[in-house]
Structures are given as structure tokens and as C-alpha cells.
Image (cartoon, rainbow, N blue to C red):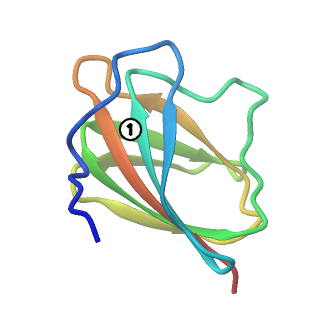
Amino acid sequence: MEKHNIFHPLPERTDAETFEDILRTPNIRIERIISHGQSSPEAGWYDQDEAEWVILLQGGAVLGFENGKEISLQAGDYVHIPAHCRHRVVMTDQEEVTIWLAVFYCN
């Protein structure tokens, strides 16, 4: 067993979000996502076979859903997204790194 820290080390600022698996088994995947002001492309909807529970640990973001609903997130806010619920990242904080923790699982 090794100790790790969700906040360190952080990858260098890039033009693309960073996705890192923390844990992966056949039934669950836990991922750290690092954003530096990125958003999904206009035509870039996530439509996943897995359900997703995501918490924003640092920064800020807005999630948009196919039905037109938008949810603003600040540090500590979390959302459950059912499988095949089409969604996208509308925006992430331009000034502060945004750190997400996402848990993907099959029902």
C-alpha cells in the first residue's frame, strides 16, 4: 500500500483536461480530472454506459445537460449522473485549477 494525495502532484497547465485513473476494477472506476478553464466541444456530449458520481474538490465549473438544465458547481458540490444522461462541461474556472473526483459504476 502507498499513500497518495489528490492535490499533489498536479500536472502542468495544458490545453487539454487531464484524466487519471485512481482505481479501476471490473465494477468501478475512480478518476481524478484536472481542468484549467476547459469546456467540452459544442458537439461533445458525454453519453456513458456507466453511472457517474462526481464531486468538485477545488475550483468551479458548470455542467450542462441535454434537456437544457445547467448546474453550477463550487468546491464541495457533487452530482449523480445516471448512465446515458447526456451531459457536457460548459465551463471550468479560468483562474484556479479545477479538481474533480469522479466515480463511475455499473448498476
The residue nearer to you, when weighing 22 against 34, is 22
Residue at image point 69% right, 86% down:
107
| Residue 19: x %, y % from top left | 52, 40
The residue nearer to you, when weighing 5 against 48, is 5
Q: In this view, does 34 lie above or below 78?
A: above
Q: Name the residue under label 1.
A: 61
Q: Which residue lies furthest to the bottom in this view?
A: 107
Q: Quadrant of residue 106?
A: bottom right
| Residue 35: x %, y % from top left | 41, 30
Q: Is residue 104 above or below residue 96?
A: below
As helix, strand or loop, the secondary structure at mark 1 comes to strand
- Mark 1: give few (<14), some (14-19) or many (20+) Cα within 10 Å: many
Q: In which quarter of the image is the N terminus?
A: bottom left
| Residue 77: x %, y % from top left | 29, 59
Residue at image point 48% right, 23% down:
38
| Residue 8: x %, y % from top left | 20, 40
Is residue 1 shown left or right of residue 63?
Answer: left
Residue at image point 24% right, 17% down:
95
Residue at image point 70% right, 69% down:
50
Is residue 47 shown left or right of residue 53?
Answer: right
Q: Which amino acid does label 1 sit on?
A: Ala
Is residue 76 shown left or right of residue 55?
Answer: left
Q: Is residue 51 above or below residue 76?
A: below
Is residue 5 shown left or right of residue 60?
Answer: left
Q: How many labels does the image show?
A: 1
